[in-house]
C-alpha cells in the first residue's frame, strides 16, 4: 500500500490540501502520526517509544465537530496531540476545555495491535542500487526487485510459486522471514533463512528509471 508521508500538518493550507486528496490518509513525520480523516471522524494514531496510541474524534452525524477541533488547535496537529495526551479518558472527556468546542464531539482512545503498523521513520524511498551491497538484507532486496535490476528469475521449488511482484509484497508485510545471499552469480531468496525458494542474477545495468507498474513502493 502506498502511503504518502507529509513533513507536518501545522497550517490551514496544509490541512485543506490534505483533505482535498482522493483519500485523506497519510503519515506525518513530526509528530510521528498516522492521520485518517474518515467520513465524520478524524483518527490519529500516535507513534511513541511504547505501543501506538489511537485517538478517534468526531460525530456520527456531521464532520463539523472534527473540523471545529482542528480550528480550535490553531490548525496544529502537534498542539492537538499534546492536548489529547493530557486528557483523562476514564472520565467524561467532553467536559475538558480542549474538546468543549462542540456538544456532539466524541473522543475515544485505543491501542491498536496491528503488527504491520509502522511509524513514518520506518518507511523508505526505494531507489535503484548504485552498486552491489556488502550484505544483502530485505531492504536491498526490495530495491533490487522494484528497480528491475535482475535477470533470469528462477523458482527453486517445484511446488511453490513466487514471482518478483509477490516477493515484494511479502517483503513489505513479512520482512523478517525473508533473506537473501549471494552464491556465485546468483542471488538466492531464502524463507526463514533456510529454505531456498527462488534465485536470480543481479544486474545493475538493467536499472529502470521508473518502477514497474503495479509494484508496491514504500514512500
Image: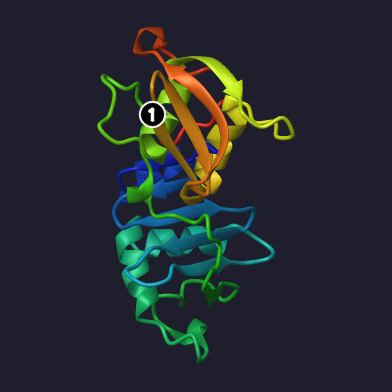
Q: Depth check: give the residue in front, 123 or 14.
A: 123
Q: Which of the image's four quarters has the C terminus? A: top left
Across and down, in percent, residue 163 comes to 62, 26
Across and down, in percent, residue 189 comes to 50, 34
Give the farthest residue toward the front.
184
Q: Which of the image's four quarters has the N terminus? A: top right
Give the farthest residue toward the top.
205
Q: Residue at x 59, y 21 (%)?
A: 154
Within the image, what quadrant is residue 136 found in?
A: top left
- Horizontal arrangement in the rendering, residue 110 relative to residue 78 (left or right): right
Q: Depth check: give the residue in front, 13 or 108.
A: 108
Residue 23 seen in render: no
Residue underneath mark 1: 182
Q: Residue at x 31, y 48 (%)?
A: 8
* For residue 166, above or below residue 88: above
- Horizontal arrangement in the rendering, residue 191 relative to residue 81 (left or right): right
Q: Depth check: give the residue in front, 163 or 100.
A: 163
Across and down, in percent, residue 50 comes to 37, 72
User: Which secondary structure lies at badge 1?
Assistant: strand
How packed mark 1 is, by other alpha carbons closer than 10 Å (few <14, some 14-19, many 20 or more), is some
* For residue 168, above or below residue 67: above
* For residue 94, above or below residue 47: below
Within the image, what quadrant is residue 14 found in?
A: top left
Instruction: Count the marks.
Output: 1
- Horizontal arrangement in the rendering, residue 8 relative to residue 183 (left or right): left
Amino acid at each position: 500500500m502506498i502511503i504518502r508521508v507529509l513533513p507536518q500538518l501545522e497550517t490551514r493550507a496544509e490541512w485543506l490540501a490534505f483533505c482535498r486528496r482522493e483519500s485523506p490518509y497519510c503519515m506525518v513525520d513530526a509528530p510521528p502520526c498516522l492521520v485518517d480523516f474518515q467520513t465524520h471522524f478524524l483518527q490519529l494514531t500516535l507513534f511513541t517509544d511504547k505501543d501506538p496510541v489511537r485517538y478517534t474524534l468526531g460525530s456520527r452525524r456531521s464532520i463539523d465537530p472534527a473540523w471545529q477541533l482542528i480550528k480550535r488547535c490553531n490548525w496544529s496537529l502537534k498542539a492537538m496531540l499534546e492536548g489529547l495526551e493530557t486528557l483523562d479518558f476514564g472520565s467524561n472527556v467532553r467536559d475538558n476545555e480542549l474538546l468543549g468546542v462542540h456538544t456532539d464531539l466524541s473522543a475515544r482512545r485505543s491501542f491498536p495491535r496491528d503488527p504491520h503498523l509502522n511509524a513514518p521513520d520506518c518507511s523508505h524511498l526505494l531507489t535503484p542500487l548504485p552498486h552491489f551491497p556488502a550484505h544483502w538484507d530485505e531492504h536491498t532486496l526490495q530495491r533490487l526487485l522494484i528497480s528491475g535490476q535482475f535477470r533470469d528469475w528462477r523458482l527453486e521449488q517445484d511446488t511453490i510459486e513466487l514471482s518478483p511482484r509477490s516477493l515484494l509484497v511479502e517483503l513489505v508485510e513479512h520482512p523478517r522471514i525473508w533473506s537473501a545471499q549471494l552464491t556465485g552469480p546468483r542471488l538466492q531468496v531464502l524463507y526463514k533463512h533456510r529454505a531456498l525458494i527462488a534465485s536470480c542474477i543481479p544486474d545493475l545495468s538493467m536499472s529502470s528509471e521508473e518502477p514497474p507498474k503495479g509494484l508496491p513502493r514504500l514512500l
